[in-house]
Amino acid sequence: MQTLPNESPIQTLLNELESLRERIATLESSLERKDDRLDHLESSLERKNERLDHLETELEGEPAANERLEARVEELEDAQTPIEARLDAHEKKLDANKDRVGELQARELEKGAHLLEENVDESEIDVVDGRLERVSKDDGRQYFRLPASDDPLERGGDVALAHGDLLPIQQLAKMDDDMLHATTSSLPSRLAAKLWKARTDPGVGDNPWERGSTGVREYVTASDMKHWIRRQERGVSDEYAKKLVSRTIDAVLELSKSRLAVRKKSQRKNGLEYTERRVLLMADAEIPGESLTAGDT
């Protein structure tokens, strides 16, 4: 430090001493901060050491835990073997019993027995020519039999109608939508089956058939059929529905084995005369399961 003019040596010494004190204070403050930082680092190190000790303790216990788990796994694996063996034995026994029941049912059927449908697994019955017939009886229940065989025990009453005796359109009409789609890919055939079901099943609700007059049991007009088709097949245009009417009529005739007829009838509406096709179920048509009744006069 330079001595200022007119500054006495004593003043100079005092100034240097003050400067030294400030420097010492600065160093002490820095040292305190370093001490604080050191204390923080030591505390952090102690916590990490404690955590490390804890992990080492846990790790020391892992081998014992692993050994217990491995022992349990071995115990369960040993127990599984006899369980699987018992299940295999039960499965073989069930299969053997099923085979025995199927064989007994086949023998009874070949003797002329009629067996309740719900008691028979049709796919498991091995009979001559593989032919089984489903029939309805007076008790309202379904039975299996060999074709045209009479039940010597007369269970369920007389056979009302055999499935094989039904017309193709009647057989299709008995199916639900899923089975109907699986049976035929033809939309006109499916519509024909639904149209027939609408005539015979009051539960369907949407029935376009009308009662006929003398000589005609029931009929449906082409125009009513068109509207009915559009209700059945959502999104079908009026033009396409007209084409489906013709194809459905053809399917009705084919699937009914021509038990139904198609006639043209002239009509007058709004002062205009037009000719329209009608599908007719004649009063004398022989429909399996339906008695012959004349139309209303």
Image (tube, rainbow, N blue to C red):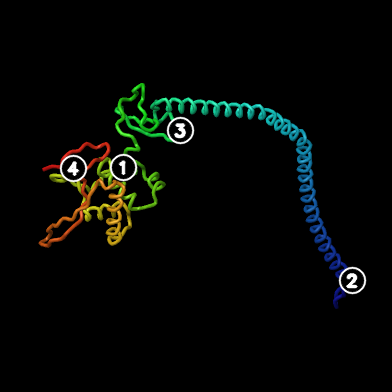
C-alpha gap between disc 1 and disc 2? 139 Å
Question: Badge 4 is on which residue?
Answer: 283
C-alpha gap between disc 4 and disc 2? 149 Å
State the image coordinates of residue 214 (x, y, percent, origin top left).
13, 44
Mark closest to the chain's N terminus, 3 or 2: 2
Question: Badge 2 is on which residue?
Answer: 9
Which is more toward the observer, 79 or 66? 79
Which is more toward the observer, 59 or 178? 178
Mark closest to the chain's N terminus, 4 or 3: 3
Q: Residue furthest right?
A: 9
State the image coordinates of residue 266 (x, y, percent, origin top left).
14, 57
- Name the secondary structure under disc 2: helix
C-alpha gap between disc 4 and disc 3? 40 Å
Mark closest to the chain's N terminus, 1 or 3: 3
Of discs 3 and 2, which sits in the foreground?
3
Q: Is residue 261 left or right of residue 79?
A: left
For label 2, the crowd category at 10 Å Cα-Cα, with few meaning under 14, some 14 to 19 and many 20 or more, is few
In what quadrant of the picture does the N terminus appear?
bottom right
Three-letter amino acid code at the position of disc 2: Pro
Mark closest to the chain's N terminus, 4 or 1: 1
